[in-house]
Image (cartoon, rainbow, N blue to C red):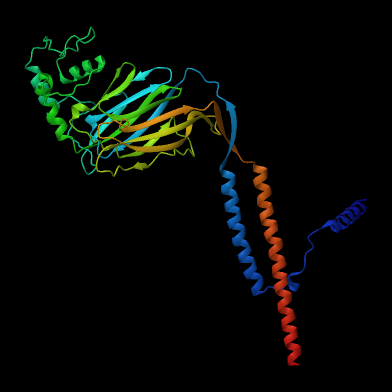
Amino acid sequence: HVTTKMAGAGDFFSRLRRFDAYPKTLDDFRERTFSGAAVSLVAAAIMLILFASELSFFLSTEIQPELFVDTSRFEKMRINVDVLFHHMPCGFLSIDVMDISGEQQLDVDHNLFKQRLDKNGNAIKDGESVPELGEGNKTAVVVQSLNSTLDPKRCESCYGAETHDIPCCNTCADVREAYRRRGWALNNADGVIQCEREGWTQKMREQASEGCNVYGHLLVNKVAGNFHFAPGKSFQQHHIHIHDMQSFGRTNFNMSHEIRRLSFGHEYPGLVNPLDGHVEIFTAQEGSAMYQYFLKIVPTRYRKANGQQINTNQYSVTTHARQTGQFGDQGLPGVFVMFDISPILVQLTETRRSFMHFLTSVCAIIGGIYTVAGMIDGAIHHSVRAWKKNRIGKQG
């Protein structure tokens, strides 16, 4: 019985061999050639390169875009700014924000910083902070020492600009702020005792050749609006936005600038901000320039493969620049950024690539190159053999 079973098993395996799609030949009947070795090495190198390319593609993420109607409400939008002004002193610059809802932020200084620069663009590291005008040409220590000799309970004149909120003006900054709230322009600071005491006019002359780097962020309503960098203190007069530039004693303002960074919200992989690195140089000898940037902001939601979600914004931009008159009669010199919000939200979702697709591609690479290499090697081998036979026949 044991012999019968063994014979049956042998007969079964003998029949199973008929399905072998890879018949083997004896080593004695195999011929190894130089052309075959060359083709094998080239095929192995191509396999390795294509495998590395396919592996890199598999490990990368795929971004799937989708469009939705933006239903968010009552949100704030963060504006990240880093702008370099080559020939505009920090003491001259004012940053204002306004939107179509009527909300205004005049002479913004919270979350924004100003770094004074010399004429070569190097930071002035003297410990002086210059967020606004009116702190004099002295260091903070000298000014503090000067004020300590004055009566702390004094109430100095605001020169007709006193209000219920500001009944006294003990510093030059207080006088200028009182004038701003009244909607008045402080044309000449020489007659103001506070400004003379702090050396305000002399300070303006000393900073005339400096530049300024403004960086930080703004928080605004998520509605259409604008923000701008312009010389002079800003104020409202008869519902008109006005900048007081006469107190500087100059009519030309060089608003040449470099936008190092301008973005709306947080960064995400692959985000491109069109204005990053943008440079504008004013070359005219007289007058000033108004630079306008019209932005269309697209709300964007970026979902990472690990489930993390980033709510941010993209934007497109159109630029326009024109020269203004020496006295601002053809427009206010400055850098103006007007933005509008798109009602469409773009959702970008990271997805991992299929492992089965990667496995199929690797098998196709190995099998395809192996088959093609075998065909090439066979063609070379038969061609060489035919050439040798033909040569032997001619010699014979």
Q: Is residue 106 among what the camera can see?
A: no
Q: Residue at x 75, y 80 (%)?
A: 386
Residue 213 placement (x, y as % from top left): 28, 35
Residue 134 relative to residue 243: left or right? left
Q: Residue at x 38, y 17 (%)?
A: 103
Residue 21 relative to residue 91: left or right? right
Figure check: 88 above or below 384: above
Q: How many marks?
A: 0
Which quarter shows the C terminus? bottom right
Q: Residue at x 54, y 25 (%)?
A: 343
Which of 175/260 is in front? 175
Residue 332 placement (x, y as % from top left): 31, 30
Figure check: 389 above or below 44: below
Residue 94 relative to residue 99: left or right? left
Quarter of the image where one finds residue 168:
top left
Q: In the current view of this chain or complex, which residue is farthest to the bottom?
A: 396
Quarter of the image where one finds residue 48:
bottom right
Q: In the current view of this chain or complex, which residue is farthest to the left?
A: 149
Q: Residue at x 16, y 25 (%)?
A: 135
Q: Is residue 332 among what the camera can see?
A: yes
Residue 33 placement (x, y as % from top left): 67, 74
Which of 256/91 is in front? 256
Residue 239 relative to residue 7: left or right? left
Figure check: 67 above or below 9: above
Which of 353/40 is in front? 353
Residue 214 placement (x, y as % from top left): 30, 32
